[in-house]
Structures are given as C-alpha cells and as structure tokens.
Image (cartoon, rainbow, N blue to C red):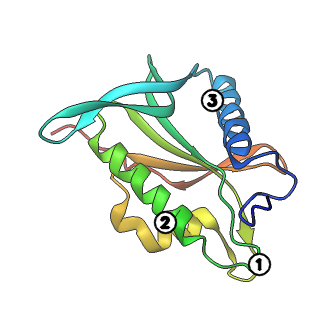
Amino acid sequence: MVNNFQRPGAVSNADVGSAFEMTAREWFANQGIRLQRNYGVEIGLSSTKVRKFDLGASEPAVLVECKSHKWTSGGNVPSAKTTVWNESMYFFLLAPAGFRKVLFVLRDFSDKRGESLAEYYVRNHSHLIPDDVEILEYDASDSTVAVSHTAPVRTPR
C-alpha cells in the first residue's frame, strides 16, 4: 500500500520521529544534560494524569517534545502538523512549574516563504506559546541548533 504522507526514503514516519528523538537526546547530552525517553510527569487542570514527554529529566528538570515536521512537498503549510505543535504547547502549559520546557524541531526552510517552519509557527502562533517554552531548531545539514523562541528571563519579585 502506498502512503502519500510518508517521508521519502523513510521506512516509516514513526522511525523518522524516533531517529529525531535520538538526535535531540544526543544534542542535549553534548550540552551536559542526560535525558530519558518517554519521561512521564503529572499534568492536568482539576485532576492530573501522567503524560509521557518524548524526552525529560528531573535533574536538571527538563521536558522536551521533538518534532521533525517539514513543509509540504508543494511548499505549503502542513496544517495538521502545526496542530500537533499546538497540542504540545498545551501539554507544556499543563506541565509542572520549574521544568525547562523545550520544543525541539527540525529546521526546514522554505525558499517560497523565506522562513523556516519554526519561524512561521512562532510568527503565526505566538499567542499559543507559553512564556516558559523554548523552541530550538536543529539544522541537520551542520548539526547546529538555533533558538526560534526563547522563554523570557524572569526576575523574582
């Protein structure tokens, strides 16, 4: 069966996601931060339930969601995928205070639009990004990471 939404050259989209999680984990390890896969924390409003984030740790307290989404083959916005990013923002909003919260995304630049998918997301969805969430863009061409959105530094009152 042909899957028109399969990443070209990939065994499965799940494999693509899993490999990207490992890339993120290695990047954080190079920064001195050891993360576990499927890291669970209690989230919720009036009641709570364990939610497993892609990566996380208690020391230092970090939660990471990884997204390796790309623009569509026609250069259009992958709206279903950005909806998944919105869901991640909601999970971060519900996560306990005190955690560093990171959306770690694959850099995918659109010549047609003149911006990366993360830049597009921040420009159009900044109202949905909690103040304490960072968006880091991983460039697979040179293994560098750039900040697309940073949590503001808050001073205690």
The vertical placement of 39 against 145, above or below, is: above
Residue in the image at 40% along x and 66% along y? 126
Image coordinates of residue 8 in percent, x first then y, are 84, 59
Image coordinates of residue 60 in percent, x first then y, are 45, 20
Query: Residue 119 versus residue 152: which sits nearer the camera?
Result: 119
Q: Residue most toward the left?
A: 46
Question: Which quadrant of the figure contains the N terminus?
Answer: bottom right
Q: Residue most toward the right?
A: 9
Q: Residues within 10 Å of mark 3 (few under 14, many from 20)?
A: few
> Could you say whether the residue bearing mark 3 is in a helix, strand or loop?
helix
Between the C-alphas of marks 1 and 2, the distance is 18 Å
Residue in the image at 72% along x and 78% along y? 75
- Residue 50 lies left or right of residue 138; in this view the side is left
Q: Residue at label 2?
A: 122
Q: Are marks 1 and 3 in contact (CB under 8 Å)?
A: no
- What label does residue 28 carry, if any? 3
Residue in the image at 15% along x and 39% along y? 157
- Residue 38 lies left or right of residue 112; in this view the side is left
Q: Amino acid at mark 1?
A: Asp
Q: Is residue 80 visible?
A: yes
Query: Residue 80 versus residue 106: which sits nearer the camera?
Result: 80
Which mark sits nearer the N-terminus, 1 or 2? Answer: 1
Q: Residue at label 1?
A: 111
Location of residue 101 (image quadrant): top left
